[in-house]
Image (cartoon, rainbow, N blue to C red):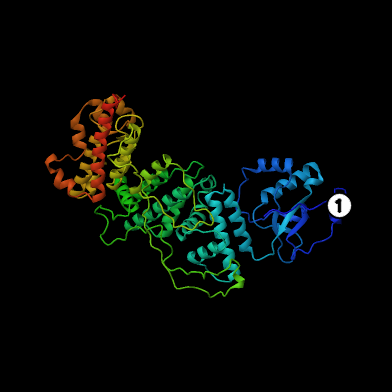
Amino acid sequence: MRVKPMVILMDKQLTDLPQVDAVGASAMLLQVGQIQPYERNPRHGRNPEYDRIKASIRANGLDQPLVITQRPGTTDYVVHSGGNTRLVALQELYAETGNVLFAHAQCLFKPWSCESDVLLAHLRENDLRGALIFIDKAIAIFDIKQLLEDELEIEEISLRKLQMVLATGGYSLSPGLISRMGYAVNRLLPVVPQALNAGLGRPQIQRIRALDKAALQTWQNYDLGDDALFDEVFSTLCQRYDAPEWDTGLLHEAIETEIAEQAEISIQTVRMELDALLAGRKPSTSTIEDNDSEIDELNKAENIEETCPANQTVCPSLKDKNDAAPNMQLEDSNKPPVHDLTATAENQSPPTSDEQAPNAVSEEIEPTIEQILITSPSAPADLKSLRSRAWTLAARLAQRNGIGDLVEPLSGNGLGFILRDVPDPTLAEQLDDDTLSQISMVWWHLAASAEMTAAPVEFITPHLPLDSVLRKTLEQQDAGLLFSSVCTLDPGQAGCRLWRRLGEKDWSDLLDLMDTYRQIHHLAEEIDTRLWG
C-alpha cells in the first residue's frame, strides 16, 4: 500500500509537529530516532543489497513507508514487517549528512498483537524479497515456535499445529520441512555453524540426517555403546569437517572408518550396511539379525500431532488454548537419497529452492534416486548426455550392491565412468557365497560397461589410485592379478547367480546400462568420433 506524501515545513523542527494518537492512526510521520529495528529479524547476516538500497534512498528518498508497531508500555516504535535494512540506511544517511530529508520517515502503523505475529510478519516479508538462507528461516521458525509456547503457556506445540498456525499467518510449510528445520537448528547448528551460515541447504541437510540415522542404527547393531556416545562421536566428526565448502562425503567416510575401527570389521562391510540403510533396505551382511529395524523414513511428520482449527489466529491469546483436532499422521512417499550419487548429481543439476514460497501450499516432494534419470534409454541424445546417463545408471547399480564408492564419472571420455578398483577382498570373509557372487558379477558387468580392460591403458590408469589392484593389473598387463582379486565365476552361472537374484530396479538399470553402452558406440560411429582420446 502506498501513502500520499505528508506535507512538511522544512524549516520546522519535527519535534514541533503535533503528537499523533498511534492506536487510531494509519499514517504517521516519525523521526528516524524514534524507530528501532526489529531485534529478532530473521536475517542474521548483512543484507547483500544494503549498499544498493542505501544509494537508492540517498538519490530518491524512502519510496515506501515503513510498517511499524509499538510494544505495550514503550515509547519507541519498532519495525513491524520488513524494512530493517531501509531504516538502518536512512539512519546512517542522516548521521552522515545531517540532511533533514533523512531525518524522518513516513510510516504505516499497525497495532501490537503479539511477538510471534510480528516475527512471522518479518519472516514472511524477508522471504518474499528472497536471499534468506535455510538456517535463517529455520531459526526464525523455531523462534516462533518458542514464542507460541510461551504465549500459549504450554510445554510443547506439535509440528502439525505449528504448521497450521504458520499457514494461517500466510507462511505455508509442510511438517516434513519443519522437521528438517528443527534438525538443522537443534542438531547441526551447534556443530557445523560455518557450513550452515555459508548456505548449506535442505538437500544437504536431508542427506546428513539420513546418514545420522543410518549410522546410529549400525552403531546399535554392533553394540558399540549407548546413543549418547554415538552423539558425541557424530558431533565431533561434524565439527572436524565444518567449513563453508561442506562435503557430506567426507563425513560419510569418517563415520564408516569410525564404526569399522570400533567394531573391528572392514570398512567395506560398514559401507554396505550404511548404503543399504540409506536406500531403505535391510543390510544384506550376515552380521545383522533379521529382526533389526530398518532406518526411519525422514519425510514423515511426527507420529502424534495436533491440528489447529482453521480459524486459529497467529496471536494465541485470542483463542481457547485447548482447541485441537484429533491426532493425525502424514504418509511419506519418498525415501532418503543415497549420498554418493545424489551429491554428485546435485552438482550437475540446476539448484532448487530451499523451501516453498510463502502463500504456496504444497507437499514436500524430495527427489529419489529413481527419479534422477529423465531420458528414456531409447531416446536420441548426444554423447555427453549418453555418457552422463551411463554414469548415473552404473553409480546407482553399484550403490545398491554396496560398491558405490568404486564408480566415478569420467567427463568427456570413454563411456562416461570408470571403476576405481576391485571390491574389498575382505568381503570374502564377511559375506555368504550368494551375496559375494552377486557383488562380484555386478562388478564385472560394470567393468565391461566401462571397458576397463578393453580401453587404451593410457586413458584409464591416470584416474586410478596408485595402489589400486586394477591399476597394477592394467600397467603390468597381468590378467591373473585381476582374477585372483575378484571372485570370478563361470559366465554360464550369470543367470542363476545374478540375473535371477537381482531386484526389479537393479535388473532394469543393468539392461538400461547395456543399452546405453550400445547407443554410445553406435552414435560415435555415426558421427565418426573416437570415444577414447
- When asked about the image quadrant of residue 410, the answer is top left
Residue 99's place in the image compared with 225, above or below, is above
Image check: 35 left or right of 487? right
- Front-most of residues 395 and 481: 395
Horizontal side of residue 282 vs 176, given as left or right: left
Q: Does residue 469 appear in the picture of this structure?
A: no
Type of amino acid at the residue the image marks with label 1: Gln
Q: Residue at x 79, y 46 (%)?
A: 101
For this view, does 350 lie left or right of residue 84? left
Q: Is residue 358 shown above or below 345?
A: below
Residue 530: x %, y % from top left: 29, 24
Give the x, y percent position of residue 417: 31, 35
Point out residue 339 in the picture as x, y percentages from the top left corner: 38, 46
User: How many marks do you count on the picture?
Assistant: 1
Q: Mark 1 packing: few (<14 Cα in 10 Å), some, or many (20+)?
A: few
Tell me the quarter of the picture where residue 428 sits: top left
Tag 1, which secondary structure?
A: loop
- Viewer-side residue, 445 vs 510: 510
The residue at the point 71 percent across, 50 percent down is: 87
On the rendered image, what quadrant is the N terminus found in? bottom right
* Residue 179 visible in the current orientation: yes
Residue 172 vs residue 440, the one in the foreground: 172
Residue at the spot of label 1: 13
Q: Quadrant of the C terminus?
A: top left
Where, by quadrant of the figure, is residue 120 drawn? bottom right
